[in-house]
Image: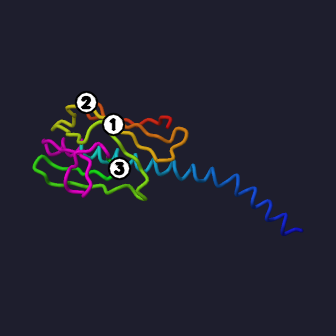
Amino acid sequence: MELLFTIAVAAIILSVGVPGFLSFVANNRAVTHTNDLVTALNLGRSEASRRGSVVTLCSSEDGTNCSDENDWSTGWVLRTAGGQVLRSWPKRSGGDGVVTANVDELSFQARGSVAVGAAFEVHLPNCRGDQKRLIAVQGTGRVSVSRVDC
């Protein structure tokens, strides 16, 4: 009887705890994907200022060349005007992150500004609540992140 009672209590605790834990994991994945992209944007801005020349961040499937798609889920690469790869970020872990933007590349000018601002959306396929992140890059090159509903 005690064993059945223990199993029943464990089942109740698991049924309450597992959904909350899965939501916690999904939220952390969205945060990780967002932080990776914000790191790339800030590095691009600082490298452009440091070098005094244009540095481009673009979506990339192979980690060296820019792709012509606005799907940033396959990864991205940071390149100088001469084509030198400064750093690349591969496809998101697990392949489940969805990263889209209104641009396929973003060029930081010598003073850290961008010619055209950009907006990125980061979320997971089974996004719930406010797990979606919106990353905005203003004309000055400043990056801001906000949580939005899925």
Relative to 144, say whether 63 is above or below. below
How many marks are shown on the rendered structure? 3
Q: Is residue 52 magenta?
A: yes
* Residue ID at (46%, 40%): 132
The residue identified by callout 3 is 73
- Depth order, front residue of 86/51: 86
Q: First in sequence: mark 3 or mark 2?
A: 3
Write the residue at 24% across / 58% down: 62
Horizontal side of residue 45 vs 23, given as left or right: left
Is 121 colored magenta in this rendering? no
Mark 3 and mark 1 lie on one chain; the one further toward the N terminus is 3
Q: Which quarter shows the N terminus?
A: bottom right
Tell me whether circle 1 and circle 2 mark residues in contact (CB < 8 Å).
no
Q: Amino acid at mark 3?
A: Ser
Q: Which numbered mark, 3 or 1, is in the foreground of this view?
A: 3
At which x and y percent is residue 48?
Answer: 18, 43
How far is disc 1 from disc 2 in space, using C-alphas?
A: 10 Å
Residue type at numbered disc 2 = Gly
Please tell me which residue lies in front, 28 or 4: 4
Q: Which residue is mark 2?
A: 139
Between 39 and 10, the residue placed more toward the observer is 10
* Marks 3/2: CA–CA distance: 24 Å
Q: Which residues are the magenta region?
A: 45-71
- Residue under the point 47% across and 36% down: 147
Instruction: Where is residue 64? Give x, y as percent.
Output: 20, 56
Mark 2 crowdedness (10 Å alpha carbons): few <14, some 14-19, many ≥20: some
Q: CA distance from mark 3 to mark 1?
A: 19 Å
Q: Quadrant of residue 45?
A: top left
Q: Which residue is labeled 1 in the image?
A: 143
